[in-house]
Image (cartoon, rainbow, N blue to C red):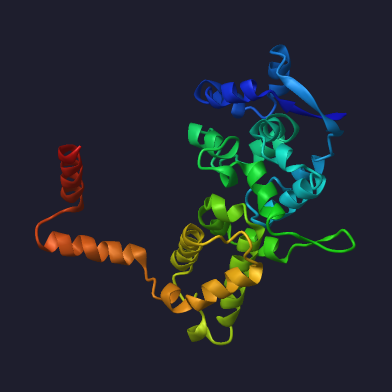
């Protein structure tokens, strides 16, 4: 059977109707394909639909490693995708609503049995906070940017496995930086730096940039790379160039502390002089209104 996709218009209509369709997303047996057919909203592409049924073996959301294996099946099944096909949201929406609908429903089922909410659906079936948050497209690009194809046609997944081993790196760190996710050399150089620095913690933790505050310091790495991209043309930068750039800034990265503690200290300092965070925020809004 040929690969199918929704029409762009049907995809737009789905995204604008999440609330009224919530009961459908909470029914793993609902047929979005029949609904699309009734509106003549399905088109065929020029290649065959691969068998993705094995992804159901990794739909259990209690095991983090399952996401890597599910993503591996998805990526290897579509390693022939052209950049044009991979960039079309209605391609991924067809997969998430038809081919992999039961996988999606099981992967994002609530542990306590409660119903999926608007935010759950918007974030993972659609594009609530960008490409990486759309579950299927996010998995595909996570592999696309980190898997290295070998001469025998197989892939080296060293970087990919590391990326999937720390979920926050994907959904709040590297994955949240669209610019980085579109540059394989950048993401590989950054990941190699992370891996090497974390490796030092076992033998000489005091020498590691990530001796503490890993999440905050990796955020700073991404910020530095983004700033670099605003200053110079990094299109020709290699994986090694990005690695060396971060290594050259290691002392600055290591200076980043506990942001939550720093915020608490600021709030306590304000409270000591009679200013609460709420009052401070209200005053900022008032000033903004005045100057506008």
Q: Is residue 15 above or below residue 125?
A: above
Q: Can the viewer see residue 57?
A: no
Q: Nearer the viewer, residue 259 or 87?
A: 87
Res 31 → quadrant: top right
Residue 86's spot in the image, x, y percent? Answer: 71, 41
Residue at 61% x, 62% y: name it: 186
Residue 36's spot in the image, x, y percent? Answer: 70, 18
Q: Is residue 125 left or right of residue 207?
A: right
Res 28 → quadrant: top right
Q: Is residue 78 left or right of residue 173?
A: right
Residue at 61% x, 59% y: name it: 235
Name of the residue lying farthest toward the left: 274
Name of the residue lying farthest toward the top: 38
Residue 103's spot in the image, x, y percent? Answer: 70, 39
How many marks on residues?
0
Q: Nearer the viewer, residue 53 or 7?
A: 7
Q: Nearer the viewer, residue 25 or 198?
A: 198
């Amino acid at each position: 059977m040929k690969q199918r996709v929704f029409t762009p218009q049907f995809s737009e209509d789905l995204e604008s109707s999440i609330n009224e369709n919530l009961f459908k997303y909470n029914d793993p047996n609902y047929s979005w394909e029949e609904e699309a057919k009734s509106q003549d909203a399905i088109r065929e592409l020029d290649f065959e639909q691969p068998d993705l049924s094995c992804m159901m073996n990794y739909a259990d959301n209690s095991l983090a490693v399952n996401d890597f294996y599910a993503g591996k099946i998805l990526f290897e099944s579509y390693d022939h995708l052209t950049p044009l096909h991979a960039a079309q949201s209605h391609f991924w929406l067809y997969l998430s609503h038809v081919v992999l609908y039961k996988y999606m429903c099981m992967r994002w089922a609530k542990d306590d049995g409660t119903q999926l909410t608007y935010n759950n659906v918007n974030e993972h079936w659609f594009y609530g906070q960008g490409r990486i948050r759309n579950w299927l497209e996010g998995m595909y690009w996570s592999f696309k940017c980190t898997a290295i194809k070998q001469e025998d046609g197989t892939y080296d997944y060293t970087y990919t496995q590391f990326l999937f081993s720390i979920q926050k790196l994907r959904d709040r760190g590297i994955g949240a930086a669209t610019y980085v996710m579109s540059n394989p050399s950048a993401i590989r150089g950054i990941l190699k730096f992370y891996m090497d620095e974390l490796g030092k913690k076992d033998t000489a933790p005091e020498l590691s940039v990530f001796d503490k505050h890993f999440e905050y310091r990796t955020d700073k790495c991404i910020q530095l790379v983004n700033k670099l991209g605003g200053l110079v043309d990094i299109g020709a930068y290699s994986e090694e160039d990005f690695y060396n750039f971060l290594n050259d800034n290691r002392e600055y990265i290591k200076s980043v502390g506990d942001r939550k503690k720093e915020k608490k200290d600021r709030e306590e300092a304000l409270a000591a002089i009679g200013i609460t965070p709420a009052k401070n925020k209200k005053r900022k809004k008032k000033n903004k209104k005045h100057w506008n």
